[in-house]
């Protein structure tokens, strides 16, 4: 069922409580990447232009109900001011008398940013009292925090039960792109799954096997599959209790005619370190005591060719330990193949893959980079996102 859109609302003179995801990476008090702030601008600008009184709420980090000085949103307010080109007020409180007073002073088109909502112990508990207190501040609730839509917290879910609600432009765009990709994909449709843990990606692999033509596996999780194929993997990442499941995934792929691609070679190291001794080996020759930390060059070429022959590619999770230079080549090759593939629509599923693409300065070449890491993953798993489910239809 289609959710109500911010476009369907008359917000002139109305107080709008708008949840955004300003959980941006910080480096010594400065914003290391403002992508998520920029992603919320269309909604914020629309509300301002339509004469709404805009109350913005976001979390940053995981302060677990405590005030953590480094996680205050003051630098975000400043950055936002720069980006929207108008004064942004900032409250050092999440809720309370001072917030009420500040809200009462706002006029149409004004913006107030509340303090990090996770400073309040009620936020993550989805506390009813806090939900009511937020609702009392406003006439309307807009959720545009796609990155946090998989959390049932007060500012993402609880407050929606007390106010007329709608989705902002970012959530709409994410749902449209990810939704279209999964429900009516251009073919060949390829999913690339990497990262560290099989157990975190079980749901998404299972769901994607019903939809894709090719499933490419890389990263640390590939080695549980390699082990399931019967090869020795040295000290590479292994989830012993998932070997049987890995086999069932490969069987499911075969029965559905899905090409299931696993590494055919790997970059192995004698320690988990940038300074380690490194060599390239075929997948059946990973030496005892060594760890596979990246896909090898033959695998990178194989994966790149599949990518270039695809019409649609979804990518979640790096191909290797890309944070260390000697193990970044596989992830880089995949990013470059996506960047070069002219007839391929590329969707980067947030989190580490988005960071990797940014790291290789290839973001501009991708068709859609989701602002959601966990959220896009849960969406791809076919789960309902509580922050979206709670919105009016
Ligand atoms: N072969 C490998 N061995 C060990 N760790 C690996 C290997 N390949 C990748 N990694 C690590 O996996 C981590 C990311 O794994 P994780 O499962 O957390 O992915 P993710 O964060 O869920 O991905 P995304 O954020 O894109 O959804 C990276 O830090 C990377 O260094
Ligand atoms: O960065 C994210 O994935 C979102 O902002 C959600 O953050 P969380 O995982 O701390 O809930």
Image: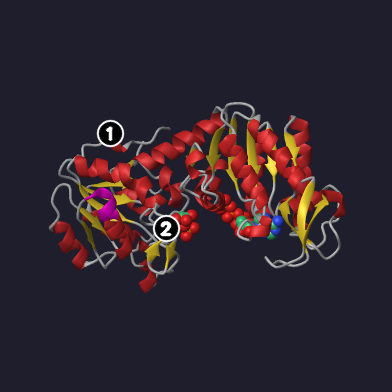
Q: Is residue 310 left or right of residue 225?
A: left
What is the span of residues highlighted in magenta in the rendered image? 80-85
Relative to residue 39, is residue 315 drawn left or right? Answer: right
Which quadrant would residue 57 be assigned to in this image? bottom left
Q: Is residue 346 visible?
A: yes
Which residue matches tag 1? 8
Tell me which residue sits at (42%, 48%) in the image. 387
Q: Name the residue under label 2.
A: 24
Q: Distance between the residues labelled 1 and 2?
A: 29 Å
Does residue 7 sit above or below 224 in this rendering? above
Q: Specify whether 129 is left or right of 138.
A: right
Q: In this view, does 334 lie above or below 351?
A: above
**On-image quarter of the N terminus:** top left
Which quadrant holds residue 94? bottom left
Mark 2 Cα within 10 Å, few/some/many (few <14, many 20+)?
A: some
Which quadrant is home to the C terminus? top left
Q: In this view, does 271 lie above or below 45?
A: below
Assign a secondary structure to mark 2.
loop
- Residue 90 lies in the magenta stretch: no
Give the image quarter of residue 172.
Answer: top left
Q: Nearer the viewer, residue 243 or 337?
A: 337
């Amino acid at each position: 069922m289609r959710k109500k859109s911010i476009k369907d609302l008359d917000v002139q003179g109305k107080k709008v409580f708008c949840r955004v995801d300003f959980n941006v990476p910080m480096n010594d008090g400065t914003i290391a990447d403002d992508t998520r702030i920029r992603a919320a601008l269309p909604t914020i600008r629309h509300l301002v232009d339509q004469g709404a009184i805009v109350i913005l709420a976001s979390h940053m980090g995981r302060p677990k109900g405590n005030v953590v000085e480094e996680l205050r949103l003051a630098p975000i307010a400043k950055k936002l001011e720069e980006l929207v080109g108008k004064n942004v007020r900032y409250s050092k409180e999440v809720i309370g008398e001072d917030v009420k007073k500040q809200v009462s002073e706002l006029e149409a088109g004004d913006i107030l940013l509340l303090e990090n909502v996770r400073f309040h112990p009620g936020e993550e508990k989805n506390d009813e009292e806090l939900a009511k207190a937020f609702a009392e501040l406003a006439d309307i609730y807009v959720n545009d925090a796609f990155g946090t839509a998989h959390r049932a917290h007060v500012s993402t879910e609880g407050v929606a039960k007390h106010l007329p609600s709608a989705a902002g432009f970012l959530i709409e765009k994410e749902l449209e792109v990810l939704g279209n990709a999964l429900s009516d994909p251009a073919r060949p449709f390829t999913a690339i799954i990497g990262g560290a843990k099989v157990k975190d990606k079980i749901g998404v692999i299972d769901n994607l096997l019903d939809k894709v033509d090719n499933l490419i596996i890389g990263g640390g999780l590939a080695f549980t599959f390699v082990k399931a194929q019967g090869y020795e993997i040295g000290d590479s990442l292994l989830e012993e209790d998932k070997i049987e499941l890995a086999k069932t995934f490969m069987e499911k792929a075969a029965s559905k005619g899905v090409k299931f691609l696993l590494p055919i070679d790997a970059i192995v190291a004698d320690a988990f370190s940038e300074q380690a001794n490194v060599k390239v080996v075929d997948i059946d020759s990973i030496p005892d005591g060594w760890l596979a930390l990246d896909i090898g060059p033959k695998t990178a070429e194989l994966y790149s060719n599949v990518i270039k022959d695809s019409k649609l590619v979804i990518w979640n999770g790096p191909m290797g330990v890309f944070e260390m230079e000697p193990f970044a080549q596989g992830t880089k090759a995949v990013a470059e193949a996506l960047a070069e593939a002219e007839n391929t629509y590329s969707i980067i599923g947030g989190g580490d893959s988005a960071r990797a693409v940014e790291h290789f300065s290839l973001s501009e070449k991708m068709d859609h980079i989701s602002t959601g890491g966990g959220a896009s993953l849960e969406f791809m798993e076919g789960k309902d996102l509580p922050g979206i489910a709670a919105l009016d239809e």
